Amino acid sequence: EVQLLESGGGLAQPEESLRLSCAASGFTFSSYALSWVRQAPGKGLEWVSATTGSGASIYYADSVKGRFTISRDNSKNTLYLQMSSLRAEDTAIYYCARYPGYSYGQTRLDSWGQGTTVTVSS
Amino acid sequence: QSVLTQPPSASGTPGQRIIISCSGSSSNIASNPVHWYQQLPGTAPRLLIDDNNQRSSGVPDRFSGSRSGTSASLAISGLQSDDEADYYCAAWDDSLKGPLFGGGTKLTVL
């Protein structure tokens, strides 16, 4: 059974940093592209970042480009999102989700974690 | 404002058939597969419709998807109270070189 478990959320002040983790199990981690998707309180879904199975190719939404860094450790079956220079508008539930194959470049996410909540406030 | 446009809300009575639309452009819906997600209250989204019209595993045949030109639709027949959820369309955009979600449609079963 595919499982994705996010952690690392919490309260941060503006301009601070936070690192999210997504621990995966139940599949061959390095064979699948992964994504971070967020949802601000009462709002819709927003694609944040994505990476291929090797981590060599990466996508960032314009709203986080230059501030967030996605990475993965295939030896630990873990996906990360390093968030820096946090803003109030980054407050959201952050979901880790899996693509059905090695690459992104489409919008089919077949497995989702339960999310971790990030709150940015002074 | 999302590039993929959905009505913010929809409603129907039990047993009724409703349709949720998703309007895009030549760079997204017209040229890339559309996927639909269902998000029940307080839960993570789940894939509902794959590649325009393929039901994901375990999805009842009351749900169906279609695509025509720059628009896509999600139809739900035999509406049930359990169908109350937010529904999102999604498609890759070749111009933006990135993935897009629609703004979401909140379905209420009266």
Image (cartoon, coloured by chain):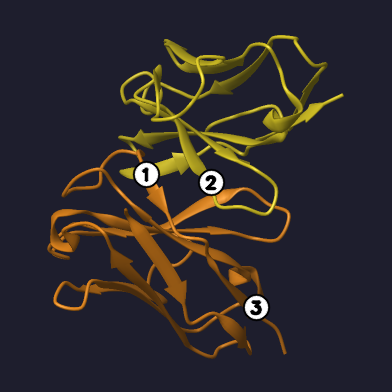
Q: Are marks 1 and 2 in contact (CB under 8 Å)?
A: yes
Instruction: Label 2, secondary structure: give it.
Output: loop
Q: Disc number at residue A119?
A: 3
Q: Quadrant of residue B1?
A: top right
Instruction: Label 1, secondary structure: give it.
Output: loop
Per the image, the residue denoted by label 2 is B45
Task: Look at chain A in the picture and name its colour.
Answer: orange
Supply the letter of whichever chain is yellow: B
Q: Chain of mark 2?
A: B
Looking at the image, which residue is at 64% across and 80% down? A120
Upstream in sequence: badge 3 or badge 1? 1
Which amino acid does the dot numbered 1 rest on? Leu
Mark 3 to mark 1 CA distance (whole Å): 25 Å
Q: Quadrant of residue B84?
A: top right
Q: Is residue A66 above or below residue B90?
A: below
Q: Are marks 3 and 1 in contact (CB under 8 Å)?
A: no
Looking at the image, which residue is at 38% across and 49% down? A111
Per the image, the residue denoted by label 1 is A109
Residue A14 at x, y = what percent? 62, 86
Q: Is residue B102 above or below residue B53?
A: below
Which amino acid does the dot numbered 2 rest on? Pro
Residue B11 at x, y = what percent? 80, 22
Mark 1 to mark 2 CA distance (whole Å): 10 Å
Which amino acid does the dot numbered 3 rest on? Thr
Mark 3 or 1, closer to the camera = 1
Few, some or many residues within 10 Å of mark 3 (<14, 14–19, 20+): many
Q: Are marks 3 and 1 on the same chain?
A: yes
